[in-house]
Amino acid sequence: MDNPETEIKKWLEGRVSAGRYRHSVGVMEAATELSELYGVDPAPLRQAALLHDCAREFSARELVARAEEWGLPVRDVDRQSPVLLHGKLAVVIAERDLGLTDPAMVSAVRWHTAGHPRMSLSDKLFYLADVLEPTSPLPWVPELRVVAHENVDRAVLMAIEINTDHLDRTGRIVDPDTYALKELLTG
Ligand SMILES: [Fe+2]
Ligand SMILES: [Fe+2]
């Protein structure tokens, strides 16, 4: 690809809604800012931003069917809450459609939905960028931005706690990887 970002943007525009596209570009901005602040290479995270939600608008049935078709592990929690699969599917789609396999990009995309106890600093910055990107309307995001500039782990923990509380309150499943990460950060 001559200019990967331009090509990925064009590809993404044809696959997702306008709102999702704007979110992805917002994540790209936020990931770039956080990478520069913490001395991490922004290039893989900029790609990750454009790719991470490319399967987010698949139906529940399609998420499970594709994961099975492509040989991804499908856990019981994934069957109960198929949206948990969308980052892992995006990794496969990035390779199949665009030939993109940068390990830092892959890892950021794979773990962006639920987090994971073995996340790298770069993965954590991406996880935060997904939540605090400039188009987010969530009322607690300004506070999260402040914490993210002070301490990455504290910010990840804050995002996880808000997220799991919300999932619990709305009766939805929390990924066991999220609990494992939370335990690691609080332990
Ligand atoms: Fe996502
Ligand atoms: Fe996202």
Image (cartoon, rainbow, N blue to C red):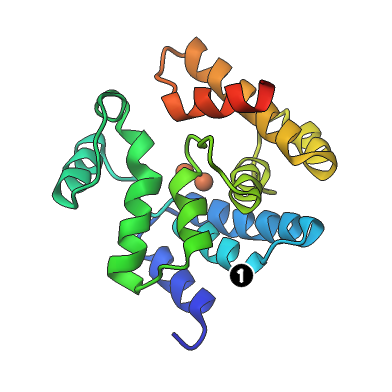
Residue farthest front in this picture:
187
Picture residue at 65% right of the left edge, 43% below the top: 128
Q: Residue at the location (26% across, 30% down)?
A: 75
Q: Which image quadrant is residue 59 in?
A: top left
Tell me the residue at 71%/36% (across/down). Answer: 153
Placement of 92 over or under 164, stated as above or below = below
Residue 63 showing in the rendered view: yes
Q: Which residue is mark 1?
A: 43
Residue 108 point in image, percent of width and height: 52, 52
Query: In this rendering, would 10 be left or right of 141?
Result: left
Image quarter hosting the N terminus: bottom left
Report whether 85 appears left or right of 132: left
Total count of labels: 1
The response on whether ligand 2 sits within 8 Å of label 1 is no
| Helix, strand or loop status at disc 1 | helix
Q: Residue at x 61, y 27 (%)?
A: 184
| Residue 29 versus residue 65 in the image, above or below | below
Residue 110 locus on image (x, y percent): 43, 48
Q: Is residue 69 left or right of residue 36?
A: left
- Near mark 1 (Cα within 10 A), the count class, few <14, some 14-19 or many ≥20, is some
- Position in image of residue 66 (x %, y %): 20, 48
User: Looking at numbered disc 1 in the image, what kind of residue is underneath it?
Assistant: Ala
